[in-house]
Image (spheres, rainbow, N blue to C red):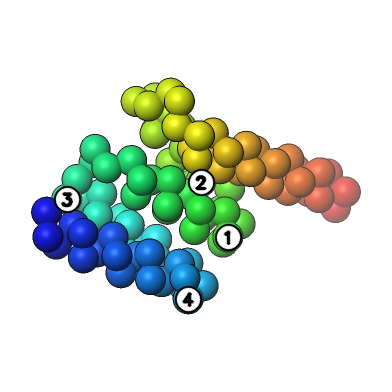
């Protein structure tokens, strides 16, 4: 549990510094220790959004919503992921 908290806090610190790729790695390590802590998934989804990795963000949010269907952060971040995917699809259609 201590290791999990340390990794999560390090991930949070990386987010504050704008180091989203490093934060993703920390949150992914957290998931190996505890798959039941849903804030790690929504935090990682935020990082994926910042990195324009919309499919990955959507997947993390879907995972949370399968278990906790009223998670507001997961709903919001999934909506942002869908929006990013739609913009990308429109841009690709124009190429």
Residue behind mark 4: 17
5 or 82: nearer the viewer? 5
Cα distance in 3D space between marks 2 and 1: 10 Å
Cα distance in 3D space between marks 2 and 4: 20 Å
**Residue at (43%, 23%) from the top-left corner?**
69
Task: Say whether residue 76 is visible.
Answer: yes
Judged from this view, the residue extending furthest toward the right is: 94
The mark found on residue 57 in the picture is: 2
**Residue at (36%, 46%) from the top-left corner?**
39
Q: Position of residue 21 (x, y in %)?
A: 45, 67
Side (left or right) of 76 relative to 93: left
Q: Earlier in the sequence, mark 2 or mark 3?
A: 3
The mark found on residue 6 in the picture is: none
Side (left or right) of 36 relative to 2: right
Whether residue 4 is situated above or below residue 69 in the rendered picture: below
Task: Say whether residue 58 is visible.
Answer: no
The mark found on residue 33 in the picture is: 3
**Residue at (33%, 40%) from the top-left corner?**
38
Q: Earlier in the sequence, mark 4 or mark 3?
A: 4
The mark found on residue 50 in the picture is: 1
Whether residue 18 is situated above or below residue 95 in the rendered picture: below
91 or 4: nearer the viewer? 4
Q: Earlier in the sequence, mark 3 or mark 1?
A: 3
């Amino acid at each position: 549990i201590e290791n999990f908290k340390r990794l999560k806090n390090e991930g949070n610190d990386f987010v504050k510094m704008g180091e989203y790729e490093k934060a993703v790695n920390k949150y992914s390590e957290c998931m190996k220790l505890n798959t039941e802590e849903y804030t790690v998934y929504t935090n990682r989804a935020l990082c994926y959004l910042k990195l324009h990795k919309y499919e990955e963000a959507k997947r993390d949010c879907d995972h949370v919503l399968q278990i906790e269907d009223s998670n507001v952060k997961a709903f919001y971040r999934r909506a942002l992921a869908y929006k990013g995917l739609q913009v990308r699809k429109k841009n690709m259609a124009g190429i």
